[in-house]
Image (spheres, coloured by chain):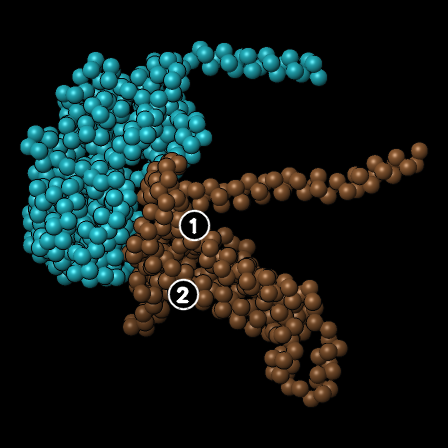
Chain colours: A cyan, B brown
Amino acid sequence: MRRFLLAGAAISAMATSTALAEESVEVLHWWTSGGEAAALGVLKENLAAKGVAWKDMPVAGGSGVQAMTALRARVTAGDPPTAVQMLGFDIKDWAEMGVLGNLDDLATEQGWDKVVPAALQDFSKFDGHWIAAPVNVHSTNWLWINKVALDKAGGKPPENIDEFFAMLDNFKEQGITPLAHGGQPWQDGTLWEALVLSEGGMDFYKKAVIEADPAALSGDTMRKVFDDLTKLRGYFDDSFSGRDWNLSSAMVIEGKAGAQQMGDWAKGEFLRAGKKPGADFVCIRFPGTQGDVLFNSDQFVMFDLGDAEKRDAQLKMAAAVEDPAFQVAFNTVKGSVPARTDVPDTEFDDCGKKGMKDLAEAATSGTLAGSLAHGHAQPSAVKEAIFDVVTQQLNGQITTDEALKRLPEAVAAAK
Amino acid sequence: MSVPYSGVRRGLQDWLPRLVLAPSFALVLIFVYGFIVWTAVLSMSKSRILPVYKWAGFDAYERLFSQPNWYMALKNLAIFGSLYITVCIALGLFLAILLDQKIRIEGVLRPIYLYPMALSFVVTGTAWKWFLNPGMGLQNTVRGWGFETFTFDWLVRPDMAIYTVAIAGIWQASGFVMAMFLAGLRGIDSEMLKAATVDGASTFTIYRRIVIPLLRPAFLSAVIVLAHMAIKSYDLVIALTGGGPGNATELPSTFMYSYTFTRSQMAVGSASAMIMLMGIAAIMVPYLYSELREDKR
């Protein structure tokens, strides 16, 4: 018994000494698909080279809902992970709780202020202090078109809503599903916000969605948005309800459907199927939204753990995230574009280059705004309240009149 | 010498049941009643993303009853719950009576009816989702046979989708209810039935006047089991429809989860949980009370 105890003590002593010898970061994230995991591998290797071990804590589930639930449990238990992948208003919510660490020193040293677009900094900073390291910028107002179907319809991508409907009519005549859509609230919301931007422009989007102005939410422009939504509903196939977005992408890839409105993560599906941008599929901004960009951005936030050694590891990780080489390696795989605007675009494909160019232009002209459907325009309570109205209108549960009446009410009730 | 020994022994006999029950009693006290109290406290706080303990009175309840979603959830629970309980019991009783006719292959049939219960709700939901999907399931297959106008698209119709949830739930649970009734039928004294036959009662009358009233304890168990399964149904809805189309299949359980964990409105979610608890209590307590009191007489 005594010998056993001694052996146990020796083992635990060894375990402590190895832990002391090597710094480590425990990272909570939801990048579990093949390409994303490979992209994270780059970050792991960079950190390993600096002597920081990586403890993986993946929680699968798109948009990170499950990951945020897991995080809540860890924080409530008083044991937060070192670093957490986070989106938009979640960052603000956690920052308000006062549990996040400060990255100001590193940001000043590396000049993040100059290279990260201001609209992104709104989420990476709280009270003027850097609290998160942005990894990428996704944008949601894209339209993905099957090239064969487009060529049969005249070959010219639509530039406004009327041309868009004309193209969909042509697809219908070709006997394919004109618009592939998945009936889940967040997908309905993604389509709705693209229509808001297209019908009203960036100023209207900011007024209606970001400021949640009741007049704009129930006005004539919003009526047009809902009318468009009803019209688009007629171009879906029968079984769109509850379909995952990647299955809709597959319909466009296989030529069973003509087009899909979805964020730039859809590109990964096309590339994995061996399709080439420009040759097999066409990526354009949603008709009527060229020049405007709705973004969402994955960021790593560092929890305040009150331990100098852990903080050192966190800073090393944040520095590795902002390393231009990692930004290129990660984003070429992920389908997004780098969060830094000073990264060269040579490694990216045509859609990626277009995305980077659009982002830089929108950042300078002030037409870059956060995406509602992906948590960068309103807190989740308001976001979901808007989803409720949009998805019910789209599914014909309520009329357009009811939707216009209910939208400002729902937003007010959720605040 | 024998006196203190028996004293110890008697003391142990007195204490043993309490000692054995103490751990589970403590666990139930903390993890059931403790958390009910905690949820009640949260529902009166300003909690949004994490629990905070700032008093907000009945604000969360006011918010809850201003949500159209909540009324949708209650309405759906009424439809789903009443269909689920009544159809499961009717179907289960019918199957049990048929199986009780001393047929030869009962041993084969019984497990066939029971097997759906062995599946998890997620499996049931996913299988029915594919089966009912108009693009690849039943509708598509029947159309492929040449019936071009055949339509069965309840799954994607907001006004009918809640009935598909009921169909899947009934498919899963009615075999289990059948087993409960079958056990009850086997417990009925055959002499009584013979006497009734001698008196000239028809089969129908025997079942209506003698067998079914004697199955009363089985009805009680079935209602209790089914009612709590209906109210806590969550995984079935999530797998089958995800709460959609729109919010057409929202139930109080899905409402509670989404408000607590994904919508950062923990207080409203807790308030909905308290209302669910009160709903169950309002139905079950009087029922249990009356049934159990009659048993004692």
Which residue is at 32% across, 71% downward? Answer: B150
| Residue A93 position within the rendered picture, expressed as x and y whole percent measured from the top left | 29, 33
| Residue B11 position within the rendered picture, expressed as x and y whole percent measured from the top left | 80, 39
Number of the label disc, if any, that sits on residue B273 = 1
Apparent side of residue A399 relative to residue A154 in the rendered image (left or right): right
- Which secondary structure lies at badge 2? helix
How much space separates mark 1 and mark 2, taking CA atoms? 19 Å
| Residue B55 position within the rendered picture, expressed as x and y whole percent measured from the top left | 37, 40
Apparent side of residue B170 relative to residue A314 in the rendered image (left or right): right
Apparent side of residue B241 relative to residue A410 in the rendered image (left or right): right
| Residue A87 position within the rendered picture, expressed as x and y whole percent measured from the top left | 27, 34
Residue B63 seen in render? yes
| Residue B205 lies in quadrant | bottom right
Camera-side mark, 1 or 2: 1
Is A203 situated above or below A303?
A: below
Is A94 situated above or below B229?
A: above
> Within 10 Å of the Cα at label 1, are there few (<14), some (14-19), or many (20+) other Cα atoms?
many
Nearer-the-camera pick, A300 or A33: A300
Which residue is at 50% across, 11% downward? Answer: A17
Task: Check contact, mark 1 vs mark 2: CB within 8 A.
Answer: no
- Which secondary structure lies at badge 1? helix
Nearer-the-camera pick, A279 or B8: B8
Is A163 situated above or below B92?
A: above
Instruction: Tell me the subunit letter for badge 1.
Output: B
Nearer-the-camera pick, A92 or B108: A92
Number of the label disc, if any, that sits on residue A145 = none
Number of the label disc, if any, that sits on residue B79 = 2
Instruction: Tell me the subunit letter for badge 2.
Output: B
Count of numbered badges drawn on the protein: 2
Which residue type does callout 1 highlight? Ala
